[in-house]
Amino acid sequence: KAGVTQTPRYLIKTRGQQVTLSCSPISGHRSVSWYQQTPGQGLQFLFEYFSETQRNKGNFPGRFSGRQFSNSRSEMNVSTLELGDSALYLCASSLSSGLVYEQYFGPGTRLTVT
Amino acid sequence: QKEVEQDPGPLSVPEGAIVSLNCTYSNSAFQYFMWYRQYSRKGPELLMYTYSSGNKEDGRFTAQVDKSSKYISLFIRDSQPSDSATYLCAPNTGNQFYFGTGTSLTVIP
């Protein structure tokens, strides 16, 4: 069974621009969560989507948004990029919402903001 | 105060050593205690988890939780070079994860 895939793997953007990251979950998984990973803060939860609805949200500004499509694929958007948004963005999928012990992570998208 | 505190290391040990990785947490609502391993340029992978207090053993790995002191430990016996990775503790409420910053471990052959 194919794992979680994320595209693109690497991205370089300029301050003020916006960016969209994509995540394809494992086949049959309906929950997708997004995380930001930085050396200083570690992994921080952004939001979780289940059946196209946002179920949980972390403590990030409104510039960070996401959505989920009917095929469970998810996108994350960051508008008005800031230097501090440079990070590894990880997507994780699971069969259902709340089954946190079954989360499977993708390889991440490395975003660099200059 | 952060939800989870974890010593970032780096930790360097010789092959065959016993490794102890630790985290402290502040939220009494945490019920599940997970450990993830993250190799360079990869996403985290679930190593093992425990529910509530106690010990759980899986091969060379033992996870231990002490809810009274809010202390989480992962022990690796007979460490191997392939164990070289970053280890993240992740206590959670069943709905949301809180990750430690990770401890970087290098096992020297």
Image (cartoon, coloured by chain):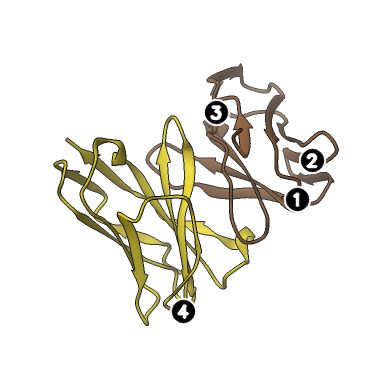
Q: Secondary structure at mark 4?
A: loop
* Residue A114 on image: x %, y %: 16, 35
Local crowd size for mark 4, using a 10 Å CA cut-off: few (<14), some (14–19), many (≥20): some
- The residue tagged 2 is B65
The answer as to whether the residues below labels 1 and 4 share one chain is no
Which of the two marks, 3 or 1, is nearer to us in this view? 1
Disc marking residue A108: none
Q: Residue at x 67, y 49 (%)?
A: B48
Residue B66 falls left or right of residue A10: right
Q: Residue furthest front?
A: A62
- The residue tagged 1 is B50
Q: Is residue A78 above or below residue A83?
A: below
Q: Colour of chain A?
A: yellow
Disc marking residue A51: 4
Residue A54 falls left or right of residue A114: right
Q: Secondary structure at mark 2?
A: strand
Q: Total marks drawn? A: 4
Local crowd size for mark 1, using a 10 Å CA cut-off: few (<14), some (14–19), many (≥20): many
Q: CA distance from mark 2 to mark 1?
A: 8 Å
Q: Secondary structure at mark 1?
A: strand
> Which chain is home to disc 4?
A
Which of the two marks, 2 or 4, is nearer to us in this view? 4
Local crowd size for mark 3, using a 10 Å CA cut-off: few (<14), some (14–19), many (≥20): some
> Which chain is home to disc 1?
B
2 and 1 marks in contact (CB < 8 Å): yes
Q: Quadrant of the C terminus of chain B?
A: top right
